[in-house]
Amino acid sequence: MLSFDIQYHWQDFQADYQAQLPAGITSILGPSGGGKSTLLSLLGGYLSGQGIIEFSGEKLDHLAPYERPVSMLFQSDNLFPQLNVWDNVAIGMSPTRRLTNEQNSKLKWALEQTQLLGFAQKFPEQLSGGQAQRVAIARVLVRDKPVLLLDEPFSALDPRLRDEMLQLVRSLTHQFNWTTVMVTHAPNDAKTLGGKVMLVEHGQVQALVDVQALSTPESGSIFTQYLGL
Amino acid sequence: MAAFVALLSYASPSDWGRFIDDPYIWRLVRFSFLQASLSALLSMALAIPVASCLYHRRFAGRQTLLNLFAVSMVVPTIVAILGIVVVYGRHGWFTSVFGFAFPLYGLGGILLAHVFFNMPLAVRVILQAYGLIPDSQWRLASQLGLSRWQAFHLIEWSYLKKTLPGLFLLVFMLCFSSFAVVLSLGGGPRSSTLEVAIYQALRFEFDLNKASYLSLLQVAICSTVALAVYKFAPAVRQDVSVYQGQRLPLRSGVLPNVIDGLSLSVVLLWVLPPFIAILSPIVSPLFWHTLQANDLWWSVWHSVRIALPSGLLALVIGLSIAALARSVRWRSRGDWLADKLEQSGNLVLMVPGLVLATGLFLLLRHLGIGLRHAYWIVVWVNAVMALPFVLRAIMPTLYQQEKRYRHLYEQLQIFGWSRLRLEWQQIRTAMAQGLAYAVLLSLGDLGVVALFGSKGLETLPMYLFQLIGSYRVEQGGCVAVVLILLCLALFYGITRLVGGRRAVI
Amino acid sequence: MPFKSFAVTAAALLASSIAAANTLNVYTYDSFASEWGPGPKIKTRFEAQCDCEVNFVALDSSVGILSRVQLEGEASEADVLLGLDLNLMQSAKQTDLLAKHNVDTTDVQTPNGWSDEYFVPFDQGYFAFIYDSEKLETPPTSLKDVVENQDLKVIYQDPRTSTPGLGLLLWMKSVYGEQAADAWAQLSEHTVTVTKGWYDGYSLFLKGEADVVLSYTTSPAYHMVAEGENKYKAAEASEGFYPQIEVAAMMNSAPNKALAEEFMQFILAPEFQNVVATGNWMYPVMNNIEPLPEAFSTLPEATKVLTLPAEQVAKQRQAWVNEWLEATTR
């Protein structure tokens, strides 16, 4: 269970988020500028606000990003351009990149899962956008943190690739029992992922419901407004 | 360039044979090479941890320290030497603290002084390279829990190593042609540089032939070093990230704290005391007395009148070279041309200033341009001399902009002036830095203005040397304080005005 | 319109040529022209008698004066060069840029008198080692003392780059002759450092870096008169002192020859000579002047003066510099 009650002020933007997210997938929907990414950055520790963040009874709000049980994928810039694919994943397990045999095979397994085995020696600038994000996911796999935050990491990919990535995230989440939170502005992504869906607007959590609500929205609900139905 | 060629036209290479096997010259070359390499390595070895510490930590006095670092290289040599002597001399602070005298005269003293001049410069150049590291890398580092050392190794070093060869070369060349410092603190003629021989040939023997041979020798040696150094320069693997975020904590530990502490103490004990010694006349009544002299303010006016236009000119020339270089980079065979353009700026440093000025003098005489235009000549020569520093300040940023947005600009057909206006917010910090360096260098210049010296060009450094030349050493010290304060004010003003309020370094 | 602009141009040209006719360009070194140097007084006094303007062009050193006119050649705007010295005379003559003067120098009070057709001396002094009498109990009384006393910390200037340095080279040569090399080697054992120019060395000495520094016998007079400080003294030299004579010369190509000649005459006049003692801290070269300040009477007197012939100096200077280099880097 990931629960939070946090406030954040920046210039004239005021945010106040409260929610409790169960294990499994939660998609965050909402209009641009509504505070979706801000919430994710607060959870990841890249912004600091007031309030409480708890995961499985552990307080996170005073921890540095690296001390939180969290992996986060951004829209871009998830890789070090000066390291090749293998090293970019390896650094997720050991900052020195000196791996034990066990870690080595784990890395191999992660590359297999993300279909990157043939790319281990390539540098990020030689990869396509989808490949680069898969490398980042491989790193999430080896890091093995129970919380995964995704900030529209697949929005730049073509529909088929995007679908594949979403399927991958879904199956990994269930396989390892992660708590995955993904920001997106495509309701279909949320449907593909399943789980819960959260609407964030004006810096607040407006609704948190099962994803089926998107397919059969009650007339007059907040989602119908957002979906323009 | 032309100026140097003009001097060469006085050369008769057939006579050079007799210079080539002069053991005296080779002894000078050996010593110049030795002390310059050691000075450059030592400056860099100290500058790297100091820069890393200054980048990661915020503390009271940090900004003051950085500003002070900017002016270290314009402190007139004699003033710096006297400052160092106050601290490390026979009756200096070092002796009174430790009870024995620092072995100042010899290689030790030369290194001490050269590090004093160049380590701060190196720190600033390195910090500039740090500025190119995208915030997203720190975001990743923070997520992955890299320690300071690991972050240094992985992130900082990969940006640093692009800067270090050029930086080494810069410091190497500055030290290779160092003159007064080497003689004064060298402890005897065993420590003399090739520059001494060039000065001797040019001034005392008026042997233009020998002077041009020696300058060519100097250019040849520095070029060889340049070639060797650029061999180690790694390919540019620049990123295209534009993410800007806030500063995130890195995992700290005992070792980084110890290293930060150590490197800061080195600065505090090495660079700061001479500065304090140099600035100490500010509390003496003589300082206020000096301030009342009319001539002082005249010379301040003359200095500013030369330095500002000269700085602007240097920036314009530098920008043109940089714009040309970046427009050809990353195109077929363009990299080669871009490299050459970048390095052409360095040539100015290899040719001794006195030689350059003398060559220009001869050239102008040929063209029939009299000394009535001395003001413009001084402005121009100073601008050219500042070019290597300007290029170093603006090149990396301009390259980064090019790499990130080239396609956007090409697609929208935005070139030249309108592109510059669009880019301005991104590059103004670097531009300010380049301009400030050029202005400061011109302000501290003595060689050029002394050779072309005439009425209306009595600058602050000249005023200072007039005082010292008339036994008034203490009063000269006061004028040095004025010079440094003026430099600080100009540096601060320019970086704020041109660089905007976000200017960090 | 064209006529008007022509008239303006013509008027401007006329005005500038008039200004040129009345301007005397004097190339000198910086401290001579500075506000504490003799320059300003000499300018006022000469302008009072010539109805002209004196324009000092301040170069960085006496060698700087020579190399500037060498660079400019015949096109130089200089009328008079003020501030060359004994040892630069030969190379200055060889440039063929100088004109003979017709100043009567029979009353000139330099050692061995004065008879040079190109140069007129304007002040003189003697090289000497300066010490702090409060710190040094037994000061040297001869050049040999300075050379041989291994406990004495010495700073002197580089003969390759400075006038006093060259002076010491000649002083050593005239005292030690063939044994100069050994003497240099002995001196280098207790030399603190060898500086580029006079002021580098002298200011290091003032900061307490050495027991003695090479300068002029007249240096203590500055400290006495200007600072009221009596502790600095010039060491005696029983072998004799080596002189430094500063000279002026007229350019062949002087744009203003008549004024230049008038100025050359003026150099030996009391109005000029009275200024050099407390302006340049050197001795005047004429007797027709006001008595020197009290401080000058405390300075060591040069009862014995050593000189080497100018031709020999010009011919062998390079060899002697090499000898010095050999001996000190041995």
Image (cartoon, coloured by chain):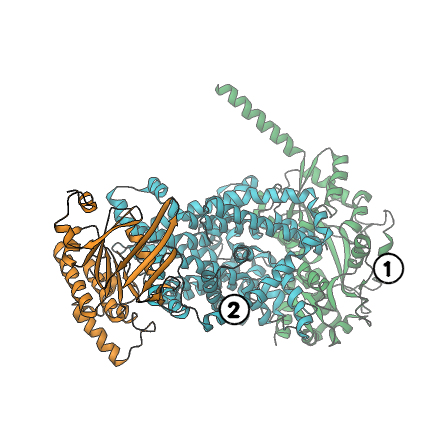
Write down the residue under mark 2: B261
- Foreground label between 2 and 1: 2
Placement of B365 over or under A133, stated as above or below: above
Q: Is residue B261 left or right of residue C92?
A: left
Q: Which numbered disc covers residue C298?
A: 1
Near-viewer residue (B389 or B102): B102
Residue B7 position, x and y percent, is 49, 53
In the rendered image of the structure, the colour used to display chain B is cyan
Q: Nearer the viewer, residue C259 or C26?
A: C26
Label 2 residue SS: helix
Q: Quick check: marks 2 and 1 in contact, CB under 8 Å?
A: no
- Residue C65 seen by the camera: no
Q: Residue at x 32, y 60 (%)?
A: A44
Q: Is residue A149 above or below residue B499?
A: below
Name the residue nearer the viewer: C133 or C39: C133
Quadrant in the picture for residue B220: bottom left
What x and y, as percent, mark residue C39?
72, 45
Percent x, y for residue A27?
Answer: 21, 56
